[in-house]
Image (cartoon, helix red, strand yellow):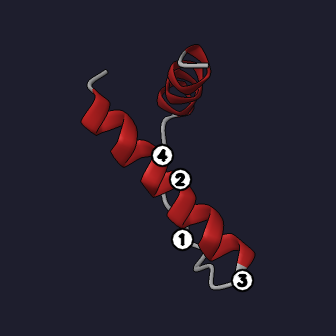
């Protein structure tokens, strides 16, 4: 992963966290692929 992508991911996560903290959360009902979610989580954890 390039440094720019990592910075973008961290920034996106921070923005999402701040939205949750400020309780300005919009719940969206959409389909997702659990394998993709788990792969993303695994990739994030590998960086640490």
2 and 4 marks in contact (CB < 8 Å):
yes
User: Measuring 29% from the left and 36% from the top, which residue is drawn there?
Assistant: 5
Disc 3 target residue: 23
| Disc on res. 13 | 2
Question: Measured from the top left, where is residue 17 in percent x and y?
Answer: 64, 63
Answer left or right for 15 relative to 22: left
Answer left or right for 13 relative to 24: left
| Disc on res. 28 | 1
Label 4 Cα neighbours within 10 Å, binned few <14 / some 14-19 / many ≥20: few
Q: Earlier in the sequence, mark 1 or mark 3?
A: 3
1 and 3 marks in contact (CB < 8 Å):
no
Disc 4 target residue: 10
Q: Earlier in the sequence, mark 2 or mark 3?
A: 2
Q: Quadrant of the C terminus?
A: top right
Give SS at disc 4. Answer: helix
2 and 1 marks in contact (CB < 8 Å):
no
> In the rendered view, would you say 12 is above or below 34?
below
The Cα atoms of the two marked residues, 4 and 1, are separated by: 22 Å
Q: Earlier in the sequence, mark 2 or mark 1?
A: 2
């Amino acid at each position: 992963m390039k440094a720019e992508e990592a910075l973008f991911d961290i920034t996106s996560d921070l923005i999402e966290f701040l939205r949750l903290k400020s309780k300005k959360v919009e719940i969206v009902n959409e389909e997702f692929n659990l394998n993709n979610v788990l792969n993303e989580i695994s990739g994030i954890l590998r960086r640490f």
